[in-house]
Image (tube, rainbow, N blue to C red):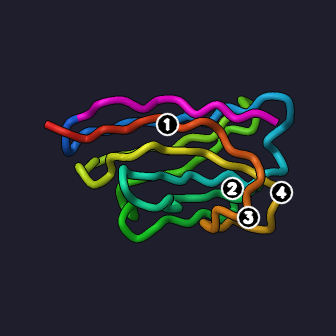
Amino acid sequence: VQLQASGGGLVQPGGSLRLSCAASGFRLDYYTIGWFRQAPGKEREGVSCISSSAGSTYYVDSVKGRFTISRDNAKNTAYLQMNSLKPEDTAVYYCATDILVGCTLVAGAYDYWGQGTLVTVSS
């Protein structure tokens, strides 16, 4: 099981980025996907998650209305579209997966993690 997160970079406040989480070695179809982030000096925070069927999604309050999680099982990839980015969104973003009922932002529920991708929001 391997996850590859990508799409991070430097963006100005108000800008957008789309993160991708590509799976290899297994099919994502039956797996819940979670996105987490960790800012310098802060604890890891759950950002969003999507159930295997995409029937359930959840967002932390700070990103509601700005971020959208999605998945394309045919491409074995999940996405996090981030709009109206703020400096406080600056962090290393991680994707994680596991077979779960629904979705959760509890990091301990996920056994499989990708490497992080850095998002920097700055003018």
Left or right: 85 in relation to 28: left
Instruction: Say whether disc 3 or disc 1 marks the residue closer to the N-terminus.
Output: 1
- The x, y position of residue 106, in whole percent, is 63, 68
Amino acid type, residue under disc 2 in the picture: Ala
On screen, residue 56 above or below 112: below
Write down the residue under mark 2: 54
Q: Which mark is residue 19?
A: 1
Tell me the chief SS of the magenta region: strand
In the rendered structure, find residue 55 and report the number of the disc placed on it. none
In the picture, measured across the screen, residue 36 lies left or right of residue 119, that is: right
Q: Residue 49: percent from the left, percent from the top?
A: 60, 58
* Earlier-in-chain disc, 3 versus 4: 4
Q: Quadrant of residue 29?
A: top right
Q: Residue at 40% x, 59% y: name it.
A: 42
Q: Magenta part of the protein: which range? A: 1-11
Examine the rendered structure and indicate whether residue 88 appears above or below residue 1.
Answer: below
Under mark 1, the amino acid is Leu
In the picture as drawn, the residue positioned furthest to the left comes out as 123
Which residue is denoted by mark 3 in the rendering?
109
Q: Of discs 3 and 4, which sits in the foreground?
A: 3
Residue 6 image position (x, y, % from top left):
53, 29
- Counting residues from the N terminus, which is met first, the one under dot 2 or under dot 3? 2
Q: CA distance from mark 2 to mark 3?
A: 18 Å
Whole-Å distance between the Cαs marked 1 and 2? 17 Å
Q: Horizontal placement of 45 versus 96: left or right?
A: left
Residue at point 66%, 65% (across, down) = 56
Q: In what element is the residue under mark 3?
A: helix
Instruction: Report helix, strand or loop for mark 1.
Output: strand
Tell me which amino acid carries mark 3. Ala
Q: Dot 4 corresponds to which residue?
A: 99
State how far apart marks 4 and 2 are (Cα): 13 Å
